[in-house]
């Protein structure tokens, strides 16, 4: 016999898994700290590449406008600006990416928890059906014994 509630729960689980796609599976395989750390390292590398590219464009634009005016003091100033700018840019970039990734991870964890609750409910439904089936089988056995000739009568 088909249990309608069980079918609804199974359908809801499948729809949630399909809508969540692969994104929530990352929460399933990694802990939050590992997930955020991984994306922090990736953000550091990407931030470094972005900053170096932007600084190189700035230097190129400066050199095309004033090629002969590069002095030692200007070179030192540019180096200090590069180091301070790099540290502050990468710091801000990594912090913002880590915050965003934490939020994404929590959302993925919430989706995973919702699916896990669906599976728990489905497990409960199976247990209820099994208990009901056992009770029904026990009653059928008692009725068969009561009907069989020569069998002891069972009191109710």
Image (cartoon, rainbow, N blue to C red):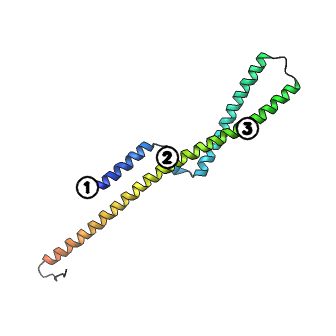
- Quadrant hosting residue 60: top right
Real-space Cα distance between discs 1 and 2? 31 Å
Relative to 83, residue 147 above or below: below
Q: Which residue is mark 1?
A: 2
Name the spot of residue 135 as percent of width and height, x first.
Answer: 26, 70
Residue at 81% across / 31% down in the picture?
79
Badge nearest the viewer, 1 or 3: 3
The numbered mark, 1 or 3, whose residue comes first in the sequence reads 1
Relative to 63, residue 12 above or below: below
Q: Which residue is mark 3?
A: 88
Residue at 27% across / 69% down in the picture?
134
The numbered mark, 2 or 3, whose residue comes first in the sequence reads 2
Q: Quadrant of the C terminus?
A: bottom left
User: Is there a contact, CB below 8 Å, between mark 1 and mark 3?
Assistant: no
Nearest to the observer: residue 91 or residue 29 = 91
Q: Which residue is mark 2?
A: 24
The numbered mark, 1 or 2, whose residue comes first in the sequence reads 1
For mark 1, give the secondary structure. Answer: loop
Badge nearest the viewer, 2 or 3: 3
Residue at 81% across / 28% down in the picture?
78
- Quadrant hosting residue 66: top right
């Amino acid at each position: 016999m088909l249990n309608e509630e069980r079918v609804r729960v199974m359908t809801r689980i499948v729809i949630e898994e399909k809508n969540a796609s692969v994104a929530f599976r990352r929460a399933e395989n990694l802990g939050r700290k590992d997930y955020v750390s991984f994306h922090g390292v990736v953000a550091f590398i990407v931030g470094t590449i972005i900053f170096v590219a932007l600084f190189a464009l700035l230097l190129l634009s400066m050199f095309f406008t004033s090629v002969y005016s590069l002095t030692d003091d200007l070179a030192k100033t540019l180096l200090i600006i590069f180091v301070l700018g790099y540290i502050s840019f990468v710091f801000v970039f990594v912090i913002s990416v880590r915050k965003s990734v934490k939020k994404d991870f929590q959302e993925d964890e919430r989706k995973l928890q919702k699916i896990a609750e669906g599976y728990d409910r489905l497990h409960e439904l199976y247990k209820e059906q099994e208990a009901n089936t056992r009770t029904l089988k026990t009653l059928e056995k008692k009725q068969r014994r009561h009907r069989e000739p020569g069998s002891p009568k069972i009191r109710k």
